Image (tube, grey):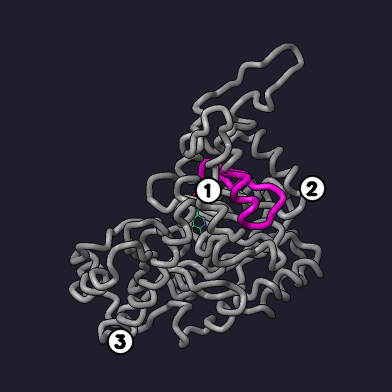
Amino acid sequence: MRLETCLAQCGSRWDDRTGAVSMPIYQTATFRHPGLGQSTGYDYTRTANPTRDVLQETLALADGGCQALAFASGMAALDCLCRLFAPGDRIVVTEDLYGGTYRLFERLQRPLGIEAVYVDTADTPSVAAALASGARALLVESPTNPLLKVTDLAALGRLAREHGALFFVDNTFMTPLLQRPLELGADVAVYSATKYLGGHDDVVAGILVAKAPELAERLAFFHNAAGAGLGPLDSWLVLRGLKTLGVRLARQQASARVVADFLANHPAVARVHYPGRPDHPGHARQQRQAAGFGAMVSFELAEPSRAGEILARARLFLFAESLGGVESLITLPAVQTHADIDPRTRARLGVTDGLLRLSIGLEDPGDLVADLQAML
Ligand SMILES: *Cc1c(COP(=O)(O)O)cnc(C)c1O
């Protein structure tokens, strides 16, 4: 069956006793033992919970991994990955990555002696050079946030293998429906399920999907030992979101293209970043390795100083952090999501004060364009 079919019915056949069509929320911390030395398979929710298990099984299937783990946030999932490393280890990382991930590496990992090396991962030779000087792992976002640069994942998968480095892909912007990192050579796919997987801006959650049992076992040990597993109710919210992922993405991508084309023809806009437009440098690569272009659109204002005034006129777009939900959001990455990156680096990367990022939701695309027209 196609993935969308599996997602539509996730959890719908779990409860044989009552036949519940919606996966029950096992809101319990602990589980009664049938007798001494006996277990139903569930002992304590930090270790395992049926609602979280169904979410994990669904996502392992979705990505073609052997095991998925659900965490209390995307950052908790990334933090779990970092536990694989020891002082002296180096990790090659996409340079324009999510601000929170940058903060994790710089403020939590660097003091422990684990060094992140930032490179433009859309440029394969730069990654080859960084890996050649020794690295334990490579962590990539593609398309990147907020500039939507596209990395050649299969080429980087081969390079990582050659250099004995683990390969992680933060696939938050794409989801397993549009891009399948484990099939392109990644060892682990990472998600902030807060975004498209949950999709309703009502839950914070993170996911790791591991390809091979050995790594999955180590990560599962950290997951239980450090205890940042996702709670039953939040697991259920992500499961409910997954059921509609396919239709949401289809609509959001179609609207994103309409919005990107409108912005590209607007005189107040200097430049549009959307991989679905043929003028985007990563367009062909994205077409090759993914089943879609996503629903994130960034654009640069011709006059950066107008950003505040433009944001103040938004009536439909919500001025808020995050992305991937049913509501369209607008953010100013330089002051919101990427504030932890120093201003010089931001300028070099192109995360300028006039760069705005849109997450396209489910509203009517004509209404979204009208809102942007009024704002600009
Ligand atoms: C939001 C986000 C994260 C962090 O996830 P949280 O659920 O907010 O902890 C990591 N990576 C990317 C690409 C994100 O967009």
Residue that carries the numbered disc 2 in the rendered image = 214
Q: What is the crowding at mark 2: few (fewer than 14 residues within 10 Å), some, or many (at least 20)?
A: few
Residue contact at pointers 1 and 3, CB within 8 angstroms: no
- Residue type at mark 2: give it: Glu
Q: Residue at x 77, y 48 (%)?
A: 213
Label annotation for residue 265: 3
Rendering quarter of residue 336: bottom left
Q: What is the crowding at mark 1: few (fewer than 14 residues within 10 Å), some, or many (at least 20)?
A: some
What distance separates the C-alpha of mark 1 from that of mark 3?
A: 42 Å
Answer yes or no: disc 2 within 8 Å of ligand 1: no
Q: Which residue is drawn at 55% across and 51% down?
A: 107
What distance separates the C-alpha of mark 3 from that of mark 2?
A: 51 Å
Answer yes or no: disc 3 within 8 Å of ligand 1: no
Q: Would residue 186 appear left or right of 354 to someone viewing this image?
A: right
Magenta stretch?
A: 55-79
Instruction: Report the mark closest to the observer, 2 or 1.
Output: 1
What distance separates the C-alpha of mark 2 from that of mark 1?
A: 29 Å
Expressed as whole percent of the image width and height from the top left, the position of residue 42 reads 65, 26
Q: Would residue 262 appear left or right of 18 to someone viewing this image?
A: left
Q: Is the magenta stretch mostly helix, strand or loop?
A: helix
Tell me if residue 115 comes above or below residue 343 in the rendering.
above
Q: What is the crowding at mark 3: few (fewer than 14 residues within 10 Å), some, or many (at least 20)?
A: few
- Residue type at mark 3: give it: Asn
Tell me if residue 226 comes above or below residue 180 in the rendering.
above
Instruction: Report the mark closest to the observer, 1 or 3.
Output: 1
Would residue 311 be counted in the magenta stretch?
A: no
The residue tagged with tag 2: helix, strand or loop?
helix
Q: Which residue is drawn at 32% across and 56% down?
A: 320
Label annotation for residue 112: none
- Residue type at mark 1: give it: Gln
